Amino acid sequence: MDSAALQLRGSGYSSSFHLPANTQITPTVKHASSPTIAGVVLCLNEASNLARALRSLSWCDELMMIDSGSSDGSQAIASSFGARVMEHRQEGRFLISEQRNWALSHGKLQSQWILFLDADEEISITCQQAIQQVIQHPAAADAYELTPRYWFLGRWLKRTQGYPNWHPRLVKRGVVGFEGGVWESFTAGHTIGRIQEPYEHYAFSKGIDDWLERHRRYADWEAEKIDAVLSGQGVQALGTRRWQHLRLAMAHAWPLRPILRFSQKYVLQGGFLEGWQGLLFALLMAGYDLITITKLIQRRRLKQGLPL
């Protein structure tokens, strides 16, 4: 970890916590007084991904999987890794913030820190070591954002996906929760740190059909929130504080979203430097926005009693 390996942010201000440039991060040796950490994986039919995710959390003091009703043997796989399995099926649309909060309130976790990981993700050795380092200093922050390396068809899309791209993942138990529905964030009023060492995200690991189905659900959520903003409900209608100003601008510029998204991913962020994978991913994301605005138009026409 270099001297900028850990950044701290608080409500309304930003600051940095620097480790010496020559600091060597080594696996933490567990002592009786060492902070404890639980790894929690959310899951629905992730048999093809789950072993990799759970293996990368084997160093945690507790291991838990919150299952949404898998039918592909995911629960048995989790149990084989020593994970405690609990099932919680949400009514209606799946909201990741609600599922994580359910884990915090019903999971009976005993560890001081809770690390959340999705089934298509993997904690790298360097990320593990950085996490073990920061939890030795519990007064430094209440929660931490982590950044993924986004893998798409064998290539890390560093530019196309705007690395580093921060996600709320590590929390002190009983101190910090989640809000924001599909696009989750930490609850407000806490000191938030950032761990620079990335984890791995294999978002395309189950193929195009799974990717399209997930983004169809995201498009439903986005269309609903854009409609609320356009109806005068204000920025709070977005339902999340993540990238709030950008989302608000994109809501008002909704007819241009596919063009803007492609320009952002492929041109401004440099996706054109990442080969055919960068081009294909930028086109897929533009297509996602095309689906979103089509759902928005459909939604507004139905509300007005107009034919589809």
Image: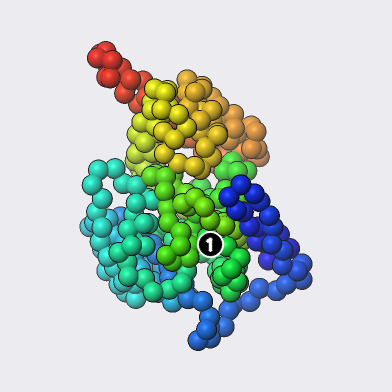
Q: Give the image location of residue 6, x and y in percent.
A: 65, 61
Classify residue 7 as left or right of residue 57.
Answer: right
Q: Does 108 appear above or below 97? A: below
Q: Give the image location of residue 233, x and y in percent.
A: 41, 27
Query: Extreme top residue here?
Result: 306
- Quarter the N terminus occupies: bottom right
Residue at (29%, 43%) from the top-left corner? 93
Q: Does 259 appear above or below 288? A: above
Label 1: which residue?
142
Mark count: 1
Q: Relative to the observer, which residue lies in front, 52 or 216? A: 216
Residue at (34%, 51%) from the top-left corner? 98
Asked if residue 122 can be seen in this view, the reply is no
Look at the image and name its color scheme.
rainbow
Residue at (73%, 72%) from the top-left corner? 23
Asked if residue 24 can be seen in this view, the reply is yes
Classify residue 181 as left or right of residue 5.
Answer: left
Q: Does 232 appear above or below 102? A: above
Q: Relative to the observer, which residue lies in front, 154 or 35? A: 35
Q: Give the image location of residue 94, x and y in percent.
A: 31, 46
Q: Give the image location of residue 4, x and y in percent.
A: 71, 59
Circle 1: element type: loop
- Quarter the C terminus occupies: top left
Disc 1 residue type? Asp
Residue at (52%, 60%) from the top-left corner? 143
